[in-house]
Image: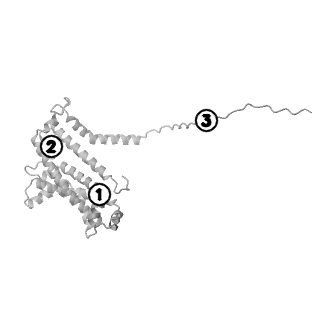
């Protein structure tokens, strides 16, 4: 009997696993830019040019070799070097620093205490006090200047650096109070309660818990006050007497003669100082209010 034939042997095929690569992203068709977006972009560009182009020109022409601003005659640092030999400018800088430093210290202390009272205290007339806190910011500076010069005239106070300091403190307290109170708004009161439970008194709690947390807000308010004080012209022009010329008043008096690179140079330095202080104040305001907090 014949045996059945064996099935044919098929060739052995080995399957090798190969890594599969990522699929290439399907390109999406670019959306055409609408005319509304183009109009908005053009408008924003024109606004920025309107705001910052004069400042750029001011900085650029502070390095101009020529005394005239009609044309460019080369690059130089001579106008910045001449500032250190100008007695009028140096005296104005000294007066501005004295006024700004004293104003910063006094306004920071009073503004911080006012912020603590409004944030923690409960007393009659609190709403009216809060509303009055914004008045120096809302009222035009020319009105504040006229009111202050009338007050000094009634009290027979001689105009000078003292009256300038009093005037600056009067309208700068509000800025510190608002900044510090905003810092207190995000304050975690449980930290103070924990310190009290551990036996700390009111002063120790404030010194070891409250003050370190609100300190960035206090410093930010102080930097803001220093910037406002050293840049102020309107109120200062009302209450400054003989020998109390500050830097903004000196710059304005120099502009009456004509715009020179020396004026541009001192204005550029004042602008640089202002920008540095404002950026520092903004960074301090963004510090977390507690160890577990996050920056905004």
Q: If you read the primary sequence from the N terminus, does the residue marked by circle 1 or circle 3 appear first?
A: 3
Label 2 sits on residue: 251
x%, y% of residue 209?
31, 61
**Badge number at residue 212:** 1
Q: Image quarter for residue 208?
A: bottom left
The answer for how far apart the CA atoms under marks 1 and 3 are is 61 Å
Quadrant position of the N terminus in the picture? top right
Q: Are marks 1 and 3 in contact (CB under 8 Å)?
A: no
x%, y% of residue 227?
22, 49
From this viewpoint, is residue 259 visible? no
Query: Quick check: 271 above or below 163?
Result: above
Q: Which mark's residue is nearer the viewer, 2 or 1?
A: 1
Q: Label 2: how many residues lie within 10 Å, few (<14), some (14-19) or many (20+)?
A: many
Q: If you read the primary sequence from the N terminus, does the residue marked by circle 2 or circle 3 appear first?
A: 3
Label 3 sits on residue: 18
For this rendering, which residue is in front, 199 or 284? 199
């Amino acid at each position: 009997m014949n045996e059945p034939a064996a099935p044919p042997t098929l060739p052995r095929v080995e399957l090798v696993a190969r890594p599969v690569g990522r699929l290439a992203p399907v390109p999406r068709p670019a959306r055409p830019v609408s005319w509304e977006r183009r109009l908005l972009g053009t408008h924003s560009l024109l606004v920025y040019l309107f705001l910052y182009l004069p400042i750029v020109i001011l900085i650029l022409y502070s390095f101009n070799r020529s005394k005239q601003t009609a044309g460019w005659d080369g690059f130089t640092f001579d106008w910045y070097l001449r500032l250190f030999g100008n007695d009028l400018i140096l005296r104005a800088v000294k007066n501005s620093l004295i006024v700004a430093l004293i104003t910063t210290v006094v306004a920071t202390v009073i503004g911080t205490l006012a912020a603590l009272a409004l944030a923690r205290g409960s007393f009659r007339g609190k709403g009216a006090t809060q509303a009055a806190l914004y008045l120096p910011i809302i009222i035009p500076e020319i009105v504040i200047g006229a009111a202050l010069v009338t007050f000094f005239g009634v009290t027979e106070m001689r105009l000078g650096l003292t009256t300038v300091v009093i005037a600056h403190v009067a309208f700068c307290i509000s800025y510190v109070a608002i900044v510090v109170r905003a810092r207190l708004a995000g304050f975690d009161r449980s930290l103070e309660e924990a310190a009290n439970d551990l036996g700390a008194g009111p002063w120790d709690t404030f010194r070891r818990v409250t003050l370190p947390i609100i300190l960035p807000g206090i410093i930010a308010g102080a930097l803001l006050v220093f910037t406002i004080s050293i840049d102020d012209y309107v109120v200062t022009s009302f209450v400054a007497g003989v020998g109390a010329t500050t830097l903004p008043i000196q710059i304005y008096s120099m502009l009456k003669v004509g715009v020179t690179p020396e004026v541009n140079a001192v204005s550029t330095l004042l602008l640089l100082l202002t920008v540095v202080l404002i950026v520092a104040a903004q960074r301090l305001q963004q510090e977390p209010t507690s160890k577990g907090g996050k920056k905004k």
